Image (tube, rainbow, N blue to C red):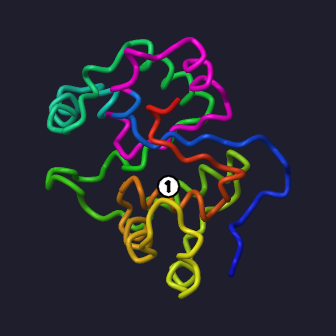
C-alpha cells in the first residue's frame, strides 16, 4: 500500500485546527497553556469560511457574514486578535475564496481549485503537497489505513468540490502527511 507523503525533515508535529466554530465555542474555557498552543507557529488554522465572514469590512460583507450559520460575531476579541496575528505570519488559510457566491446555502457552490490553493499554502508551511490524486484515493487497498473517514469517495468528492467536511478533510491531511507529522483537529481539543 502506498505510504503517506512525508517531508524529509524530522520537524515537530504540526497541528492543523480546521474549525473556527470549534475554536469560538471553546474560547471561554481556554487556559494559558491552551492559548500558547494555539499561538505556536506549529499550529495552523485551516478554516472552511471566507475571511470576510470573520472580519467583514463593508456593509455588504457584514450582511453576508450575518447569513452564515456560524456565530463569528460572538468571537472573543482575543481569539480574533490571535487569528489576525497568525494570519500575518502565514499560519491561517481560508478555504473559500472571497468572490465565491455562497448565497445558495450549505455546502455552497463547488470550487474545484480550493484544495490546490490549500496544498500550495501547506507547501509554503514546509509540509509538502496534499495528496490530491483521486486514483490513489480510489485504489482498493487504501481505506484499511483510514482513521477519520472510511470512504475514499467522500474524501475525493470533498477535495474535488472544494468543500470543508470535517472527517474528509482530517483524512486528507492524515493520508497526505501521516499522523506522526500532522495532527488534524477540530480546534476545541487545544
Q: Is residue 33 magenta?
A: yes
Tell me where the magenta segment starts and ends, as one range. Answer: 24-52
Residue 183 appears left or right of 45: right
Q: Position of residue 188 (x, y in %)?
A: 44, 32
Above or below, 5 against 40 in this view is below
* Quadrant assignment, res 164: bottom left
* Figure quadrant of residue 136: bottom right
Position in image of residue 69 (x %, y %): 19, 38
**Whether residue 92 is situated above or below residue 173 in the rendered picture:** above
- On the image, the x and y values in percent for residue 91 come to 59, 35
Of 179 and 70, nearer the camera is 179
Q: Can residue 46 be found in the magenta stretch?
A: yes
Q: Which residue is drawn at 67% across and 59% down?
A: 178
Q: Mark 1 points at which residue?
A: 170
Q: Residue furthest right?
A: 9
Relative to 112, say whether 56 is above or below: above
| Side (left or right) of 129 relative to 66 | right
Amino acid at each position: 500500500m502506498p505510504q503517506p507523503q512525508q517531508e524529509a525533515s524530522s520537524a515537530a508535529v504540526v497541528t492543523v485546527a480546521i474549525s473556527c466554530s470549534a475554536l469560538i465555542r471553546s474560547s471561554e474555557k481556554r487556559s494559558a497553556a491552551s492559548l500558547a498552543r494555539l499561538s505556536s507557529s506549529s499550529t495552523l488554522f485551516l478554516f472552511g469560511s471566507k475571511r470576510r465572514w470573520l472580519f467583514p469590512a463593508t456593509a455588504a460583507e457584514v450582511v453576508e457574514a450575518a447569513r452564515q450559520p456560524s456565530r463569528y460575531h460572538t468571537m472573543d476579541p482575543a481569539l480574533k486578535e490571535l487569528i489576525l496575528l497568525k494570519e500575518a505570519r502565514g499560519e491561517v488559510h481560508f478555504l473559500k475564496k472571497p468572490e465565491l457566491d455562497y448565497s445558495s446555502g450549505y455546502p455552497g457552490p463547488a470550487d474545484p481549485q480550493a484544495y490546490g490553493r490549500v496544498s500550495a499554502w501547506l507547501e509554503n508551511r514546509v509540509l509538502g503537497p496534499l495528496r490530491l490524486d483521486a486514483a490513489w484515493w480510489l485504489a482498493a487497498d487504501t481505506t484499511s489505513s483510514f482513521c477519520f473517514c472510511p470512504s475514499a469517495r467522500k474524501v475525493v468528492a470533498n477535495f474535488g468540490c472544494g468543500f470543508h467536511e470535517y472527517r474528509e478533510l482530517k483524512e486528507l491531511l492524515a493520508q497526505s502527511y501521516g499522523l506522526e507529522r500532522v495532527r488534524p483537529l477540530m480546534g476545541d481539543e487545544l
